[in-house]
Amino acid sequence: MPFDRRFLDELTARSDIVDVVGSYVSLSQRGSEYWGCCPFHSEKTPSFHVRPEQQTYYCFGCKKGGGVISFIMELENLSYPDAVRFLARRANIPVPEEARDDGASRLRARLLALNRDAARFYYQQLHSPKGEEVMAYMRARKITQKNATNFGLGAASSEWDGLLTAMAEKGYTRSELLASGLVINGKNGGAYDKFRSRLIFPIIDVRGDVLGFGGRIISKDDPGAKYMNTPETAVYSKRRVLYGLNLAKKSKRGSILLVEGNIDVVMLHQAGFDNACASMGTALTQEQIHLLSRYTKDIVLCYDNDDAGKIATQKALSLLNDTDFNVRVLELPKRLVDGQYVKQDADDFIKYQGADAFENLLTGSESGTDFRMAQLKSKFDLTNDRGRIEYASAAAQLLAAIPNAVEREVYTVRAAEDAGITADALKTEVSRALSRKIKKDRREQEKRDLRPATAAQPKERSMRYENTRSALAEEGIVRLLTLDDSLFGGEPPLREGEFSSPLLARFFFALWQQRGTPGGVRLSALDGVFSSDELGHLTGILQKPESTDHDARSRALADYLRVIKEESERRANAEDPLAAAMKKYTHNT
Protein backbone atom coordinates (compact mmCIF):
# COMPACT_ATOMS: atom_id res chain seq x y z
CA MET A 1 0.00 0.00 0.00
CA PRO A 2 1.18 3.57 -0.65
CA PHE A 3 1.98 5.93 2.19
CA ASP A 4 -0.95 7.82 3.66
CA ARG A 5 -1.20 11.34 2.24
CA ARG A 6 -1.64 12.93 5.67
CA PHE A 7 1.51 11.19 6.90
CA LEU A 8 3.47 12.45 3.86
CA ASP A 9 2.15 15.98 4.37
CA GLU A 10 3.31 15.93 8.00
CA LEU A 11 6.66 14.44 6.99
CA THR A 12 7.41 17.09 4.36
CA ALA A 13 6.16 19.85 6.70
CA ARG A 14 8.63 18.70 9.35
CA SER A 15 11.45 18.13 6.86
CA ASP A 16 12.16 21.68 5.73
CA ILE A 17 14.17 21.45 2.54
CA VAL A 18 16.63 24.17 3.59
CA ASP A 19 17.45 22.22 6.77
CA VAL A 20 17.73 18.87 4.99
CA VAL A 21 19.78 20.13 2.04
CA GLY A 22 21.84 22.32 4.37
CA SER A 23 23.02 19.22 6.24
CA TYR A 24 24.75 18.11 3.01
CA VAL A 25 25.50 21.37 1.20
CA SER A 26 26.90 24.68 2.44
CA LEU A 27 24.13 27.14 1.52
CA SER A 28 24.25 30.94 1.34
CA GLN A 29 21.09 33.01 1.40
CA ARG A 30 20.44 35.42 -1.46
CA GLY A 31 17.14 37.17 -0.95
CA SER A 32 14.45 34.54 -0.49
CA GLU A 33 16.56 31.73 -2.01
CA TYR A 34 19.60 29.70 -0.94
CA TRP A 35 22.56 28.87 -3.17
CA GLY A 36 25.46 26.44 -2.98
CA CYS A 37 27.70 24.14 -5.01
CA CYS A 38 25.75 21.21 -6.41
CA PRO A 39 26.13 17.90 -4.54
CA PHE A 40 25.38 15.98 -7.74
CA HIS A 41 28.16 17.27 -10.00
CA SER A 42 31.51 19.03 -9.60
CA GLU A 43 31.55 22.82 -9.76
CA LYS A 44 33.30 25.82 -8.23
CA THR A 45 30.65 28.44 -8.98
CA PRO A 46 27.35 27.69 -7.21
CA SER A 47 24.51 26.84 -9.61
CA PHE A 48 22.42 24.84 -7.14
CA HIS A 49 19.60 26.64 -5.39
CA VAL A 50 16.81 25.94 -2.92
CA ARG A 51 13.45 27.70 -2.85
CA PRO A 52 11.89 27.51 0.64
CA GLU A 53 8.50 28.81 -0.51
CA GLN A 54 8.20 25.98 -3.05
CA GLN A 55 10.17 23.46 -0.94
CA THR A 56 12.17 22.57 -4.05
CA TYR A 57 15.79 22.39 -5.16
CA TYR A 58 17.23 22.79 -8.66
CA CYS A 59 20.67 22.83 -10.27
CA PHE A 60 21.05 24.96 -13.38
CA GLY A 61 24.19 22.97 -14.25
CA CYS A 62 23.15 19.31 -14.17
CA LYS A 63 19.36 19.98 -14.26
CA LYS A 64 18.55 17.83 -11.24
CA GLY A 65 15.64 19.01 -9.12
CA GLY A 66 12.61 18.08 -7.07
CA GLY A 67 11.39 18.07 -3.48
CA VAL A 68 12.91 16.96 -0.20
CA ILE A 69 12.14 13.26 -0.68
CA SER A 70 13.61 13.15 -4.18
CA PHE A 71 16.72 14.95 -2.85
CA ILE A 72 17.30 12.15 -0.32
CA MET A 73 16.51 9.49 -2.94
CA GLU A 74 19.12 10.93 -5.29
CA LEU A 75 21.85 11.74 -2.78
CA GLU A 76 21.55 8.67 -0.57
CA ASN A 77 20.77 6.30 -3.48
CA LEU A 78 17.53 5.14 -1.84
CA SER A 79 14.20 3.99 -3.20
CA TYR A 80 11.15 6.17 -2.56
CA PRO A 81 9.90 4.15 0.48
CA ASP A 82 13.41 4.01 1.94
CA ALA A 83 13.86 7.77 1.48
CA VAL A 84 10.54 8.36 3.26
CA ARG A 85 11.69 6.17 6.14
CA PHE A 86 15.06 7.95 6.20
CA LEU A 87 13.33 11.32 6.62
CA ALA A 88 10.84 9.87 9.12
CA ARG A 89 13.70 8.72 11.33
CA ARG A 90 15.33 12.13 10.96
CA ALA A 91 12.08 13.91 11.95
CA ASN A 92 11.28 11.31 14.64
CA ILE A 93 7.93 10.48 13.05
CA PRO A 94 6.60 6.90 13.22
CA VAL A 95 5.88 5.34 9.84
CA PRO A 96 2.30 4.02 9.54
CA GLU A 97 2.20 0.24 9.75
CA GLU A 98 -0.18 -0.03 6.81
CA ALA A 99 2.43 1.47 4.47
CA ARG A 100 4.19 -1.74 3.54
CA ASP A 101 7.35 -1.91 1.46
CA ASP A 102 7.15 -2.36 -2.27
CA GLY A 103 9.12 -5.22 -3.81
CA ALA A 104 12.32 -3.23 -4.31
CA SER A 105 12.37 -1.87 -0.76
CA ARG A 106 11.58 -5.28 0.69
CA LEU A 107 14.47 -6.81 -1.25
CA ARG A 108 16.80 -4.00 -0.17
CA ALA A 109 15.88 -4.53 3.48
CA ARG A 110 16.42 -8.28 3.18
CA LEU A 111 19.81 -7.85 1.51
CA LEU A 112 21.01 -5.42 4.18
CA ALA A 113 19.94 -7.88 6.88
CA LEU A 114 21.62 -10.74 4.99
CA ASN A 115 24.87 -8.78 4.62
CA ARG A 116 24.85 -7.95 8.32
CA ASP A 117 24.39 -11.62 9.23
CA ALA A 118 27.05 -12.64 6.69
CA ALA A 119 29.52 -10.17 8.23
CA ARG A 120 28.90 -11.75 11.64
CA PHE A 121 29.36 -15.22 10.12
CA TYR A 122 32.71 -14.28 8.54
CA TYR A 123 33.85 -12.62 11.79
CA GLN A 124 33.00 -15.75 13.80
CA GLN A 125 34.77 -17.91 11.20
CA LEU A 126 37.93 -15.85 11.64
CA HIS A 127 37.97 -16.69 15.34
CA SER A 128 37.23 -20.38 14.84
CA PRO A 129 39.52 -23.24 13.73
CA LYS A 130 38.22 -22.77 10.15
CA GLY A 131 39.76 -19.29 10.10
CA GLU A 132 43.25 -20.27 11.24
CA GLU A 133 44.81 -19.89 7.77
CA VAL A 134 43.35 -16.40 7.40
CA MET A 135 44.42 -15.52 10.94
CA ALA A 136 47.97 -16.66 10.11
CA TYR A 137 47.91 -14.46 7.00
CA MET A 138 46.80 -11.48 9.12
CA ARG A 139 49.65 -12.09 11.56
CA ALA A 140 52.10 -12.18 8.64
CA ARG A 141 50.70 -8.86 7.41
CA LYS A 142 51.01 -7.53 11.00
CA ILE A 143 47.29 -6.70 11.27
CA THR A 144 46.49 -6.44 14.98
CA GLN A 145 43.43 -8.03 16.50
CA LYS A 146 42.21 -4.64 17.68
CA ASN A 147 42.38 -3.21 14.18
CA ALA A 148 40.77 -6.30 12.66
CA THR A 149 37.85 -5.86 15.04
CA ASN A 150 37.67 -2.15 14.23
CA PHE A 151 37.13 -2.98 10.54
CA GLY A 152 35.05 -6.11 11.23
CA LEU A 153 37.45 -8.31 9.25
CA GLY A 154 36.44 -11.90 8.75
CA ALA A 155 37.41 -15.18 7.12
CA ALA A 156 35.93 -17.26 4.34
CA SER A 157 37.04 -20.86 4.72
CA SER A 158 37.76 -23.25 1.88
CA GLU A 159 34.25 -24.77 2.14
CA TRP A 160 32.13 -24.46 -0.99
CA ASP A 161 28.85 -23.86 0.83
CA GLY A 162 29.71 -22.75 4.37
CA LEU A 163 28.03 -19.35 4.12
CA LEU A 164 25.18 -20.64 1.95
CA THR A 165 24.25 -23.29 4.53
CA ALA A 166 24.54 -20.91 7.50
CA MET A 167 22.40 -18.23 5.88
CA ALA A 168 19.80 -20.71 4.66
CA GLU A 169 19.41 -21.88 8.25
CA LYS A 170 18.63 -18.27 9.18
CA GLY A 171 15.75 -18.24 6.70
CA TYR A 172 17.32 -16.52 3.69
CA THR A 173 16.17 -17.91 0.36
CA ARG A 174 18.39 -18.98 -2.51
CA SER A 175 17.12 -16.10 -4.63
CA GLU A 176 18.08 -13.62 -1.89
CA LEU A 177 21.54 -15.17 -1.55
CA LEU A 178 22.04 -14.93 -5.31
CA ALA A 179 20.77 -11.34 -5.36
CA SER A 180 23.29 -10.42 -2.65
CA GLY A 181 26.22 -11.64 -4.75
CA LEU A 182 27.40 -13.84 -1.87
CA VAL A 183 26.37 -17.02 -3.69
CA ILE A 184 26.89 -18.05 -7.32
CA ASN A 185 24.95 -20.53 -9.46
CA GLY A 186 26.90 -23.64 -10.41
CA LYS A 187 26.90 -25.37 -13.80
CA ASN A 188 25.10 -28.43 -12.45
CA GLY A 189 22.15 -26.48 -11.06
CA GLY A 190 23.58 -26.12 -7.59
CA ALA A 191 25.03 -23.04 -5.91
CA TYR A 192 28.23 -22.23 -4.02
CA ASP A 193 29.88 -19.45 -1.98
CA LYS A 194 31.50 -16.63 -3.95
CA PHE A 195 34.20 -16.03 -1.31
CA ARG A 196 36.39 -18.98 -0.31
CA SER A 197 39.83 -19.07 1.34
CA ARG A 198 39.94 -15.30 1.62
CA LEU A 199 40.38 -12.51 4.13
CA ILE A 200 37.03 -10.73 4.16
CA PHE A 201 36.55 -6.96 4.32
CA PRO A 202 32.94 -5.87 5.02
CA ILE A 203 32.10 -2.79 2.96
CA ILE A 204 30.24 -0.47 5.33
CA ASP A 205 28.66 2.83 4.30
CA VAL A 206 28.59 6.06 6.30
CA ARG A 207 25.24 5.06 7.86
CA GLY A 208 26.71 1.82 9.19
CA ASP A 209 24.96 -0.54 6.76
CA VAL A 210 26.95 -3.48 5.36
CA LEU A 211 26.56 -3.08 1.59
CA GLY A 212 28.85 -5.86 0.41
CA PHE A 213 32.26 -7.48 0.83
CA GLY A 214 35.79 -7.53 -0.50
CA GLY A 215 37.92 -10.65 -0.34
CA ARG A 216 41.70 -11.06 -0.66
CA ILE A 217 43.44 -14.35 -1.42
CA ILE A 218 45.70 -15.58 1.39
CA SER A 219 47.92 -17.90 -0.63
CA LYS A 220 50.33 -16.96 -3.42
CA ASP A 221 49.49 -20.30 -5.04
CA ASP A 222 45.79 -19.44 -5.31
CA PRO A 223 44.98 -19.05 -9.05
CA GLY A 224 42.05 -16.72 -8.31
CA ALA A 225 41.97 -12.96 -8.57
CA LYS A 226 44.02 -11.19 -5.89
CA TYR A 227 41.02 -9.10 -4.86
CA MET A 228 37.36 -9.95 -5.34
CA ASN A 229 34.42 -7.68 -4.54
CA THR A 230 30.67 -8.07 -4.30
CA PRO A 231 29.09 -7.43 -7.75
CA GLU A 232 26.60 -4.61 -8.28
CA THR A 233 23.44 -5.37 -6.29
CA ALA A 234 20.28 -3.62 -5.12
CA VAL A 235 22.26 -2.22 -2.16
CA TYR A 236 25.85 -2.02 -3.46
CA SER A 237 27.25 0.19 -6.20
CA LYS A 238 31.03 0.51 -6.24
CA ARG A 239 30.75 4.01 -7.73
CA ARG A 240 28.93 5.29 -4.66
CA VAL A 241 31.00 3.97 -1.76
CA LEU A 242 34.51 4.40 -0.37
CA TYR A 243 36.01 1.66 1.77
CA GLY A 244 36.80 2.94 5.26
CA LEU A 245 34.98 6.26 4.92
CA ASN A 246 32.62 5.21 7.74
CA LEU A 247 35.69 5.44 10.02
CA ALA A 248 37.70 8.12 8.20
CA LYS A 249 34.85 10.63 8.47
CA LYS A 250 35.43 10.67 12.26
CA SER A 251 39.12 11.59 11.95
CA LYS A 252 40.35 14.83 13.51
CA ARG A 253 43.04 15.26 10.84
CA GLY A 254 40.69 17.37 8.72
CA SER A 255 41.70 15.84 5.37
CA ILE A 256 40.85 12.56 3.65
CA LEU A 257 43.69 10.34 2.41
CA LEU A 258 42.74 8.37 -0.70
CA VAL A 259 44.65 5.15 -1.39
CA GLU A 260 44.13 2.19 -3.71
CA GLY A 261 43.60 -0.94 -1.63
CA ASN A 262 41.69 -2.25 1.38
CA ILE A 263 44.88 -3.47 3.09
CA ASP A 264 46.40 0.02 2.65
CA VAL A 265 43.40 1.52 4.47
CA VAL A 266 43.56 -1.02 7.30
CA MET A 267 47.31 -0.58 7.83
CA LEU A 268 47.19 3.23 7.60
CA HIS A 269 44.52 3.34 10.30
CA GLN A 270 46.63 0.99 12.41
CA ALA A 271 49.61 3.35 12.02
CA GLY A 272 47.55 6.33 13.17
CA PHE A 273 46.39 7.69 9.81
CA ASP A 274 42.70 7.25 10.53
CA ASN A 275 41.64 9.52 7.66
CA ALA A 276 42.42 6.92 4.96
CA CYS A 277 39.85 5.34 2.65
CA ALA A 278 39.86 3.70 -0.79
CA SER A 279 37.69 3.35 -3.87
CA MET A 280 36.32 -0.11 -4.55
CA GLY A 281 38.31 -1.56 -7.44
CA THR A 282 37.66 1.42 -9.68
CA ALA A 283 39.01 4.88 -10.40
CA LEU A 284 37.66 7.80 -8.39
CA THR A 285 34.11 8.67 -9.48
CA GLN A 286 31.92 11.78 -9.38
CA GLU A 287 29.62 10.05 -6.90
CA GLN A 288 32.55 9.38 -4.55
CA ILE A 289 33.69 13.00 -4.85
CA HIS A 290 30.23 14.20 -3.86
CA LEU A 291 30.29 11.80 -0.92
CA LEU A 292 33.68 13.16 0.20
CA SER A 293 32.44 16.75 -0.03
CA ARG A 294 30.17 16.11 2.98
CA TYR A 295 33.16 15.58 5.25
CA THR A 296 36.16 17.54 3.98
CA LYS A 297 37.53 20.09 1.53
CA ASP A 298 41.08 18.68 1.71
CA ILE A 299 42.04 15.54 -0.21
CA VAL A 300 45.42 13.83 -0.40
CA LEU A 301 45.89 11.33 -3.23
CA CYS A 302 48.29 8.50 -2.37
CA TYR A 303 48.06 5.93 -5.15
CA ASP A 304 50.72 3.35 -6.02
CA ASN A 305 53.81 4.77 -7.74
CA ASP A 306 53.59 2.55 -10.82
CA ASP A 307 52.27 3.63 -14.22
CA ALA A 308 48.72 2.56 -13.36
CA GLY A 309 48.85 4.59 -10.13
CA LYS A 310 50.08 7.68 -11.95
CA ILE A 311 47.32 7.37 -14.53
CA ALA A 312 44.75 6.99 -11.71
CA THR A 313 46.18 10.12 -10.05
CA GLN A 314 45.91 12.11 -13.29
CA LYS A 315 42.30 11.00 -13.78
CA ALA A 316 41.42 11.90 -10.19
CA LEU A 317 43.03 15.33 -10.57
CA SER A 318 41.03 15.94 -13.76
CA LEU A 319 37.80 15.16 -11.91
CA LEU A 320 38.77 17.33 -8.94
CA ASN A 321 40.01 20.22 -11.09
CA ASP A 322 36.64 21.97 -11.29
CA THR A 323 35.77 21.56 -7.61
CA ASP A 324 36.57 23.63 -4.55
CA PHE A 325 38.64 20.82 -2.99
CA ASN A 326 42.20 21.58 -1.92
CA VAL A 327 44.04 18.63 -3.51
CA ARG A 328 47.54 17.38 -2.74
CA VAL A 329 49.48 14.39 -4.07
CA LEU A 330 51.66 12.16 -1.91
CA GLU A 331 54.00 10.33 -4.31
CA LEU A 332 55.59 7.31 -2.66
CA PRO A 333 59.28 6.76 -3.53
CA LYS A 334 60.31 3.43 -5.01
CA ARG A 335 62.16 0.94 -2.80
CA LEU A 336 65.58 -0.54 -3.59
CA VAL A 337 65.43 -4.36 -3.60
CA ASP A 338 68.40 -6.47 -4.76
CA GLY A 339 69.83 -3.57 -6.72
CA GLN A 340 66.53 -2.72 -8.43
CA TYR A 341 63.92 -0.08 -7.58
CA VAL A 342 60.44 -1.52 -7.19
CA LYS A 343 57.10 0.12 -6.60
CA GLN A 344 55.57 0.21 -3.15
CA ASP A 345 52.15 1.06 -1.78
CA ALA A 346 51.28 2.77 1.50
CA ASP A 347 51.32 -0.54 3.37
CA ASP A 348 54.85 -1.33 2.08
CA PHE A 349 56.15 2.13 2.94
CA ILE A 350 54.90 2.01 6.53
CA LYS A 351 56.19 -1.53 6.94
CA TYR A 352 59.74 -0.67 5.81
CA GLN A 353 60.07 3.05 6.61
CA GLY A 354 57.64 3.49 9.49
CA ALA A 355 54.79 5.82 10.41
CA ASP A 356 57.06 8.83 11.13
CA ALA A 357 58.53 8.69 7.63
CA PHE A 358 55.04 8.51 6.16
CA GLU A 359 53.99 11.50 8.28
CA ASN A 360 56.94 13.47 6.87
CA LEU A 361 55.89 12.56 3.33
CA LEU A 362 52.31 13.53 4.09
CA THR A 363 53.37 16.89 5.48
CA GLY A 364 55.47 17.59 2.39
CA SER A 365 52.97 16.31 -0.18
CA GLU A 366 52.77 18.45 -3.28
CA SER A 367 49.78 20.19 -4.80
CA GLY A 368 47.87 18.63 -7.65
CA THR A 369 49.33 21.20 -10.05
CA ASP A 370 52.87 20.37 -8.88
CA PHE A 371 52.23 16.71 -9.66
CA ARG A 372 50.79 17.39 -13.11
CA MET A 373 53.62 19.75 -14.02
CA ALA A 374 56.21 17.20 -12.84
CA GLN A 375 54.55 14.44 -14.87
CA LEU A 376 54.47 16.70 -17.93
CA LYS A 377 58.11 17.68 -17.52
CA SER A 378 59.19 14.03 -17.39
CA LYS A 379 57.87 13.48 -20.94
CA PHE A 380 60.34 15.88 -22.60
CA ASP A 381 64.10 16.07 -23.05
CA LEU A 382 64.93 19.55 -21.80
CA THR A 383 68.60 19.25 -22.76
CA ASN A 384 67.86 20.23 -26.37
CA ASP A 385 65.98 23.06 -28.03
CA ARG A 386 63.32 20.85 -29.60
CA GLY A 387 62.39 19.33 -26.24
CA ARG A 388 62.23 22.73 -24.54
CA ILE A 389 59.98 24.15 -27.29
CA GLU A 390 57.60 21.18 -27.13
CA TYR A 391 57.53 21.31 -23.32
CA ALA A 392 56.77 25.05 -23.33
CA SER A 393 53.88 24.52 -25.75
CA ALA A 394 52.40 21.65 -23.70
CA ALA A 395 52.93 23.54 -20.43
CA ALA A 396 51.12 26.58 -21.83
CA GLN A 397 48.03 24.43 -22.51
CA LEU A 398 48.06 23.00 -18.98
CA LEU A 399 48.71 26.39 -17.35
CA ALA A 400 45.91 28.07 -19.30
CA ALA A 401 43.44 25.70 -17.64
CA ILE A 402 44.34 27.00 -14.15
CA PRO A 403 41.47 29.34 -13.20
CA ASN A 404 43.33 31.28 -10.48
CA ALA A 405 45.46 34.02 -12.08
CA VAL A 406 47.99 34.15 -9.23
CA GLU A 407 48.49 30.38 -9.24
CA ARG A 408 48.83 30.46 -13.02
CA GLU A 409 51.52 33.17 -12.74
CA VAL A 410 53.53 31.23 -10.12
CA TYR A 411 53.59 28.00 -12.11
CA THR A 412 54.34 29.82 -15.36
CA VAL A 413 57.52 31.26 -13.85
CA ARG A 414 58.55 27.81 -12.54
CA ALA A 415 57.88 26.14 -15.89
CA ALA A 416 59.92 28.81 -17.68
CA GLU A 417 62.86 28.07 -15.40
CA ASP A 418 62.54 24.34 -16.12
CA ALA A 419 62.49 24.99 -19.86
CA GLY A 420 65.41 27.42 -19.70
CA ILE A 421 63.44 30.26 -21.29
CA THR A 422 62.39 33.67 -20.05
CA ALA A 423 59.24 33.94 -17.98
CA ASP A 424 57.93 36.64 -20.35
CA ALA A 425 58.21 34.29 -23.33
CA LEU A 426 56.18 31.54 -21.60
CA LYS A 427 53.67 34.07 -20.26
CA THR A 428 53.02 35.11 -23.84
CA GLU A 429 52.37 31.47 -24.84
CA VAL A 430 50.09 30.95 -21.84
CA SER A 431 48.21 34.15 -22.70
CA ARG A 432 47.68 32.93 -26.27
CA ALA A 433 46.54 29.51 -25.08
CA LEU A 434 44.14 31.14 -22.60
CA SER A 435 42.78 33.42 -25.32
CA ARG A 436 42.18 30.42 -27.61
CA LYS A 437 40.44 28.59 -24.78
CA ILE A 438 38.15 31.55 -24.03
CA LYS A 439 37.28 31.96 -27.72
CA LYS A 440 36.56 28.24 -28.06
CA ASP A 441 34.29 28.27 -25.00
CA ARG A 442 32.51 31.37 -26.32
CA ARG A 443 31.94 29.80 -29.75
CA GLU A 444 30.50 26.67 -28.17
CA GLN A 445 28.19 28.77 -26.01
CA GLU A 446 27.08 30.80 -29.04
CA LYS A 447 26.28 27.58 -30.92
CA ARG A 448 24.14 26.47 -28.00
CA ASP A 449 22.43 29.85 -27.85
CA LEU A 450 21.64 29.67 -31.58
CA ARG A 451 19.80 26.39 -31.09
CA PRO A 452 16.77 27.49 -29.04
CA ALA A 453 14.76 24.47 -30.10
CA THR A 454 17.51 22.18 -28.86
CA ALA A 455 17.89 24.18 -25.65
CA ALA A 456 14.16 23.84 -24.99
CA GLN A 457 14.29 20.06 -25.15
CA PRO A 458 14.48 17.94 -21.97
CA LYS A 459 17.93 16.62 -21.15
CA GLU A 460 16.87 12.96 -21.38
CA ARG A 461 16.23 11.69 -24.90
CA SER A 462 13.25 9.61 -23.76
CA MET A 463 11.42 12.82 -22.75
CA ARG A 464 12.14 14.83 -25.94
CA TYR A 465 9.36 16.97 -27.44
CA GLU A 466 7.94 16.23 -30.90
CA ASN A 467 6.28 19.67 -31.17
CA THR A 468 8.41 22.32 -29.47
CA ARG A 469 5.93 25.21 -30.04
CA SER A 470 3.10 23.34 -28.34
CA ALA A 471 5.33 21.88 -25.63
CA LEU A 472 6.63 25.30 -24.54
CA ALA A 473 3.03 26.47 -24.19
CA GLU A 474 2.20 23.28 -22.27
CA GLU A 475 5.11 24.05 -19.95
CA GLY A 476 3.54 27.48 -19.45
CA ILE A 477 0.18 26.17 -18.24
CA VAL A 478 1.95 23.71 -15.90
CA ARG A 479 3.93 26.61 -14.50
CA LEU A 480 0.86 28.84 -14.07
CA LEU A 481 -1.02 26.01 -12.35
CA THR A 482 1.67 25.84 -9.65
CA LEU A 483 1.93 29.63 -9.35
CA ASP A 484 -1.78 30.52 -9.20
CA ASP A 485 -4.42 27.83 -9.63
CA SER A 486 -7.17 30.47 -9.27
CA LEU A 487 -6.52 31.31 -12.93
CA PHE A 488 -8.27 28.09 -13.87
CA GLY A 489 -11.95 27.19 -13.80
CA GLY A 490 -13.61 24.18 -12.25
CA GLU A 491 -12.73 21.82 -15.11
CA PRO A 492 -9.35 21.24 -16.80
CA PRO A 493 -8.99 23.61 -19.79
CA LEU A 494 -7.46 20.83 -21.91
CA ARG A 495 -8.03 17.18 -22.62
CA GLU A 496 -5.11 14.81 -22.27
CA GLY A 497 -5.05 14.19 -26.03
CA GLU A 498 -4.55 17.90 -26.73
CA PHE A 499 -1.09 17.81 -25.17
CA SER A 500 1.72 17.10 -27.62
CA SER A 501 3.94 15.83 -24.79
CA PRO A 502 2.61 12.87 -22.77
CA LEU A 503 5.01 13.79 -19.96
CA LEU A 504 3.68 17.36 -19.70
CA ALA A 505 0.14 15.99 -19.72
CA ARG A 506 1.04 13.73 -16.79
CA PHE A 507 2.58 16.70 -14.96
CA PHE A 508 -0.50 18.86 -15.51
CA PHE A 509 -3.11 16.32 -14.42
CA ALA A 510 -1.05 15.14 -11.43
CA LEU A 511 -0.86 18.77 -10.25
CA TRP A 512 -4.53 19.36 -11.11
CA GLN A 513 -5.57 16.61 -8.70
CA GLN A 514 -4.01 18.59 -5.86
CA ARG A 515 -6.38 21.54 -6.28
CA GLY A 516 -8.45 22.00 -3.15
CA THR A 517 -6.24 19.75 -1.02
CA PRO A 518 -4.41 21.04 2.10
CA GLY A 519 -1.25 22.76 0.95
CA GLY A 520 -2.60 23.27 -2.56
CA VAL A 521 -0.71 22.63 -5.77
CA ARG A 522 2.94 21.85 -5.02
CA LEU A 523 5.71 19.92 -6.69
CA SER A 524 6.93 18.25 -3.50
CA ALA A 525 3.79 16.06 -3.47
CA LEU A 526 4.95 14.41 -6.71
CA ASP A 527 7.98 12.70 -5.16
CA GLY A 528 7.57 8.98 -5.75
CA VAL A 529 5.10 9.56 -8.60
CA PHE A 530 7.69 10.64 -11.18
CA SER A 531 11.28 9.55 -11.77
CA SER A 532 14.21 11.73 -10.66
CA ASP A 533 14.87 12.79 -14.27
CA GLU A 534 11.22 13.72 -14.76
CA LEU A 535 11.11 15.70 -11.51
CA GLY A 536 14.32 17.46 -12.50
CA HIS A 537 12.72 18.53 -15.77
CA LEU A 538 9.53 19.68 -14.05
CA THR A 539 11.53 21.70 -11.52
CA GLY A 540 13.44 23.28 -14.41
CA ILE A 541 10.14 24.30 -16.01
CA LEU A 542 9.14 26.07 -12.80
CA GLN A 543 12.37 28.12 -12.81
CA LYS A 544 11.35 29.95 -15.99
CA PRO A 545 9.93 33.44 -15.40
CA GLU A 546 6.26 34.41 -15.38
CA SER A 547 4.69 37.76 -14.58
CA THR A 548 3.62 38.36 -10.98
CA ASP A 549 0.57 40.36 -12.16
CA HIS A 550 -2.69 38.40 -12.09
CA ASP A 551 -4.11 39.97 -15.27
CA ALA A 552 -0.85 39.38 -17.14
CA ARG A 553 -0.91 35.76 -16.05
CA SER A 554 -4.51 35.43 -17.29
CA ARG A 555 -3.46 36.74 -20.70
CA ALA A 556 -0.48 34.38 -20.73
CA LEU A 557 -2.76 31.44 -19.94
CA ALA A 558 -5.07 32.38 -22.82
CA ASP A 559 -2.09 32.61 -25.19
CA TYR A 560 -0.73 29.25 -24.05
CA LEU A 561 -4.12 27.57 -24.49
CA ARG A 562 -4.54 29.11 -27.96
CA VAL A 563 -1.17 27.78 -29.12
CA ILE A 564 -1.83 24.30 -27.72
CA LYS A 565 -5.25 24.05 -29.38
CA GLU A 566 -3.87 25.35 -32.71
CA GLU A 567 -1.15 22.72 -32.71
CA SER A 568 -3.59 20.02 -31.58
CA GLU A 569 -5.94 20.84 -34.47
CA ARG A 570 -3.00 20.88 -36.88
CA ARG A 571 -2.00 17.38 -35.77
CA ALA A 572 -5.58 16.18 -36.02
CA ASN A 573 -5.98 17.57 -39.55
CA ALA A 574 -2.63 16.30 -40.79
CA GLU A 575 -3.24 13.62 -43.44
CA ASP A 576 -1.76 10.23 -42.77
CA PRO A 577 1.32 9.82 -45.06
CA LEU A 578 0.37 6.26 -46.00
CA ALA A 579 -3.19 7.32 -46.84
CA ALA A 580 -1.86 10.20 -48.97
CA ALA A 581 0.43 7.83 -50.87
CA MET A 582 -2.42 5.41 -51.50
CA LYS A 583 -4.66 8.27 -52.67
CA LYS A 584 -1.98 9.44 -55.09
CA TYR A 585 -1.45 5.91 -56.39
CA THR A 586 -5.20 5.37 -56.94
CA HIS A 587 -5.52 8.71 -58.78
CA ASN A 588 -2.57 7.94 -61.08
CA THR A 589 -3.94 4.55 -61.99
Image: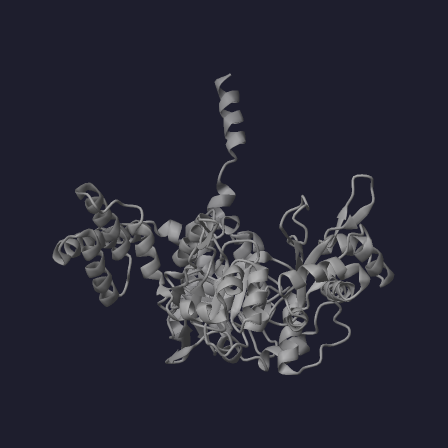
Nearer the observer, 155 or 286: 155
* Color style of the picture: one colour
Q: Is residue 367 above or below residue 586?
A: below
Expressed as whole percent of the image width and height from the top left, the position of residue 188 reads 82, 39
Q: From this viewpoint, is residue 221 visible?
A: yes
Expressed as whole percent of the image width and height from the top left, the position of residue 475 reads 46, 60
Q: From this viewpoint, is residue 68 visible?
A: no
Nearer the observer, 174 or 491: 174
Expressed as whole percent of the image width and height from the top left, the position of residue 251 reads 52, 76
Looking at this view, name the residue that lies furthest to the right: 169
Q: Quadrant of the N terminus?
A: bottom right
- Count the marks: 0
Q: Is residue 202 left or right of residue 191?
A: left
Looking at this view, name the residue that lies furthest to the top: 589
Nearer the observer, 300 or 344: 344
Expressed as whole percent of the image width and height from the top left, the position of residue 360 reads 41, 70
> At 83% from the left edge and 60% from the top edge, which residue is drawn?
166
Q: Is residue 291 left or right of residue 187?
A: left
